[in-house]
Image: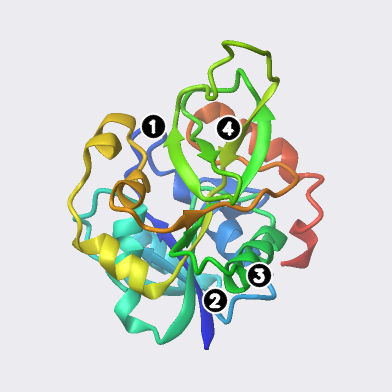
Amino acid sequence: MKIIGLIPCRLNSKRLPGKALLEIDGLPIIVHTAKRALLSKSLNEVYVCTDSKEIINICKKNNIKTIKTSSKFNNGTERIASVANKFNCKLIVDIQGDEPLINPNYIDQVVKFHIKNKNKPDIIIPTIEIPYDSNKSIVKVVHSKSNRILYLTRANVPYRFKSVITSVKKHLSVISFTPYALKKYAKLKETFLESVEGVELLRAIENDFKVYTVPLKGDSFSIDLKEDYTRALIYMQTDKFRKKY
């Protein structure tokens, strides 16, 4: 059965309006993200899911498949869940549309971990280690010994009460779902902790989905602010995957 990559994308970003179409090295951010997802060895098909005609048009010019969605969603997970019924597949991988430097190998590692995991997870959220005092907007992950996720938060956790730690685990924006989990998520209302933290996958944890993590090595960042865009312009100049598309 197929593995499908879905990239939720909207044009009206609150913090950096129109960021999906901002150019880096001659291509819009959304095109970089899709082209890099297509470099994954695990994905059979990749689609950008959006309500924006401008994004659809730019994707078509760059030979990227799209699915037109409604604009009435609270988050990207709801957006891709709305089209999950279109596919007969084993897994659906959510690749966030604002990660133009995403490593395609991350996608392969997440898919492999999900398929081979004996606990039969509903969702896999990978992590990488970052400095303890990183930006508070970054979502951190707390998990058990079996890698089952206990909590997602923007706070610095664990709290340094008895001993000092120098790093925390960051939520990476490549998330694999079983189709059933996505469809179930779409039927659920926003939960309390989700509304407080502004972390959409807390909805899954609060409703007892089996959510696991796999630790990855490397670096990754989303473009949320102008400073992130400036950073991406610099990093792309020496990026090893750029020459492949």
Measured Cα–Cα span from mark 1 to mark 2: 28 Å
241 or 61: which is nearer to us?
241
Give the residue pinned by disc 4: 228
Give the residue pinned by disc 2: 63
Amino acid carrying mark 1 in the image: Arg
Give the crowd class for mark 2: few <14, some 14-19, many >=20 residues within 10 Å: few
**Disc 3 vs disc 1: Cβ atoms closer than 8 Å?**
no
Measured Cα–Cα span from mark 3 to mark 4: 30 Å
Secondary structure, mark 3, is: helix
Measured Cα–Cα span from mark 3 to mark 2: 27 Å
Give the crowd class for mark 3: few <14, some 14-19, many >=20 residues within 10 Å: few
State which tag comes first along the sequence, 3 or 4: 3
Give the residue pinned by disc 3: 112
Q: Quadrant of residue 131?
A: top right
135 or 209: which is nearer to us?
209
Q: Nearer the viewer, mark 3 or mark 1?
A: 3
- Residue 119, given in percent of the width and then of the height, sits at 53, 66
Q: From the viewer's perspective, is residue 87 above or below residue 233?
A: below
